[in-house]
Image: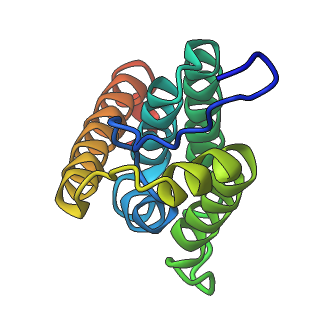
Amino acid sequence: MSMMETEVTTSVPDIKIYPYSQFYGTAFLGGPLAGGYLVAENYKAFGQPDKVRKTWIATISSMLVLCVVGYLLRNVTSFPNLIVPVAYSSAGGALMRYLQGKQIDAHKANGGPTYHWTRAFVAGLVGLIVTLCLFLLLGFIVLSFFPEYQ
């Protein structure tokens, strides 16, 4: 082969990623923590460790915002409960598609493997458990320092 010719090979990537389709259900079940985990894992797989930290900062920030929203909506009886999880799942999925769309599409086009849906489901369950534990801990702390909220 001469210097002018280049060999083009398409190799199948051996790393696994989470596709878009798994994000929505995982984030709906496990909240922003579970959705952020999927995005961070994809960034690790794509070799972008600098974006992993930014993803976790954004994830924790969105979790705090959701806590405030939940607190503000706690006494609103006419507000459908499903709006909030549907909204953050849809927004997170759109953000995942915007930030990682080209990489995910290229990975899948090259025949790259994706994680099985059960792994994303378990991530959602873990996110749900961690979120519930954080809310219980936060409630305990608030009631310890402000007993008038009982």
Residue at x-position 62% and y-position 44%: 103
Q: Is residue 33 above or below residue 73?
A: above
Q: Quadrant of the N terminus?
A: top right
Q: Is residue 51 above or below residue 100?
A: above
* Residue 75 x %, y %: 58, 68
The tally of labels here is 0
- Looking at this view, name the residue that lies furthest to the right: 4
Given residues 6 and 72, the one toward you in this image is 6
* Residue 147 x %, y %: 39, 30
Residue at x-position 42% and y-position 32%: 41
* Residue 133 x %, y %: 25, 36
* Residue 105 seen in render: yes
- Looking at this view, name the residue that lies furthest to the front: 2
Q: Quadrant of the C terminus?
A: top left
Q: Quadrant of residue 138?
A: top left
* Residue 19 x %, y %: 46, 58
Given residues 126 and 121, the one toward you in this image is 121
Given residues 130 and 143, the one toward you in this image is 130
Q: Is residue 128 left or right of residue 145?
A: left
Q: Is residue 124 left or right of residue 77?
A: left
* Residue 69 seen in render: no
Residue at x-position 69% and y-position 61%: 94
